[in-house]
């Protein structure tokens, strides 16, 4: 058992008190080399209560930090661990958990279902092939959904949280190149364009994009080409360490 798993087990077995007014929600974006997806859960079936689709999230324990809570909640609901999560926004609308569609579920799972809840949003960007999520706790299933096909009726205000996370991700991607780690160590210009288009959700002119990306000196050629491809092998690039 690794240290991370041991710490999670300790949190799960010790009698911790829960803060009824503070939660964390995790927006895990997954890239499959073509599309940007988001990790969602389906709540477990309870009697006649409609099952809703939601983000992995839950209340914070009184004796844990927000970062630790985000890691714990994500692990407890999806089995994912070792993911870098970045805090991006706090959602504090007094009515964010008072929608009638959410009340029955809250009454089944929360000791204080009427309590106002402020949630802190975290986002991450991962290669989908590197992680195999598994549902647990009050999540019946966990699955990847293309960002553009996310249902517009998620639990609570989770649609708004995903929209805000996307805006934050796009700002970080363009300003700080957060997300480039999703590419292989050596990649083609087409692969990096696909990443740009997936995150920014827009088509880019091939010629202009290549001219711009090469002008920025972010990349350097490796003098290697693709192997075992059916089309003409393309030049491979890598990031310029300078």
Image (spheres, grey):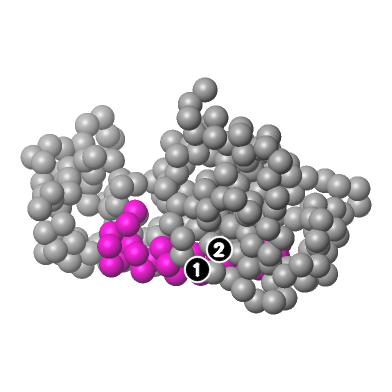
Q: Looking at the image, which residue is at 71% across and 41% down?
A: 15
Residue 109 drawn at (x, y percent): 80, 52
Q: Is residue 113 above or below residue 242?
A: below
Q: Which mark is residue 211?
A: none
Judge from the rendering whether residue 20 lies leftward or rightward of residue 124; answer left or right.
Answer: right
Report the Cα–Cα distance between label 2 and label 1.
Answer: 6 Å
Q: Which residue is mark 2?
A: 120
> Of helix, strand and loop, which one carries label 2?
strand
Q: Is residue 1 visible?
A: yes
Residue behind mark 1: 89
Q: Residue at x 23, y 46 (%)?
A: 188
Q: Name which quarter of the figure residue 6 lies in.
A: top right
- Residue at horizontal 73 percent and vertical 44 percent from the top: 138
Which stretch is magenta?
153-179
The picture places residue 44, in percent across and down from the top left corner, at: 78, 45
Q: In the rendered structure, which disc, 2 or 1, sits on the residue that comes first in sequence?
A: 1
Closest to the observer, 209 or 151: 151
- The local crowd at label 1, few if under 14, some if 14 to 19, many if 20 or more residues have their Cα within 10 Å, is some
The answer to if 43 sits in the magenta stretch is: no
Q: Quick one: SS at disc 1? A: strand
* Vertical arrangement, residue 165 with respect to residue 194, above or below: below
- The answer to whether 55 appears left or right of 99 in the picture is left
Proximity of marks 2 and 1: CB atoms separated by less than 8 Å: yes
Q: Quadrant of residue 174?
A: bottom left
């Amino acid at each position: 058992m690794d240290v991370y798993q041991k710490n999670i087990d300790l949190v799960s077995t010790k009698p911790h008190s829960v803060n009824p007014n503070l939660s964390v929600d995790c927006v895990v974006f997954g890239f499959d080399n073509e599309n940007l997806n988001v990790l969602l859960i389906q709540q477990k079936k309870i009697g006649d209560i409609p099952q809703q689709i939601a983000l992995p999230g839950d209340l914070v324990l009184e004796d844990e930090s927000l970062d630790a809570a985000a890691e714990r909640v994500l692990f407890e609901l999806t089995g994912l661990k070792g993911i870098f999560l970045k805090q991006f926004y706090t959602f504090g609308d007094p009515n964010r958990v008072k929608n009638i569609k959410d009340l029955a579920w809250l009454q089944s799972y929360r000791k204080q279902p009427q309590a106002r809840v402020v949630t802190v949003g975290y986002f991450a960007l991962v290669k989908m092939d590197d992680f195999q999520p598994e549902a647990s706790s009050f999540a019946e299933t966990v699955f990847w959904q293309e960002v553009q096909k996310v249902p517009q009726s998620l639990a609570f205000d989770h649609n708004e949280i995903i929209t805000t996370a996307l805006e934050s991700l796009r700002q970080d991607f363009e300003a700080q190149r957060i997300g480039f780690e999703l590419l292989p160590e050596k990649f083609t210009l087409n692969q990096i364009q696909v990443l740009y288009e997936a995150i920014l959700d827009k088509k880019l002119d091939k010629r202009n994009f290549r001219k711009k990306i090469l002008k920025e000196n972010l990349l350097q050629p490796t003098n290697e080409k693709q192997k075992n491809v059916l089309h003409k092998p393309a030049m491979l690039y890598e990031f310029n360490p300078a």
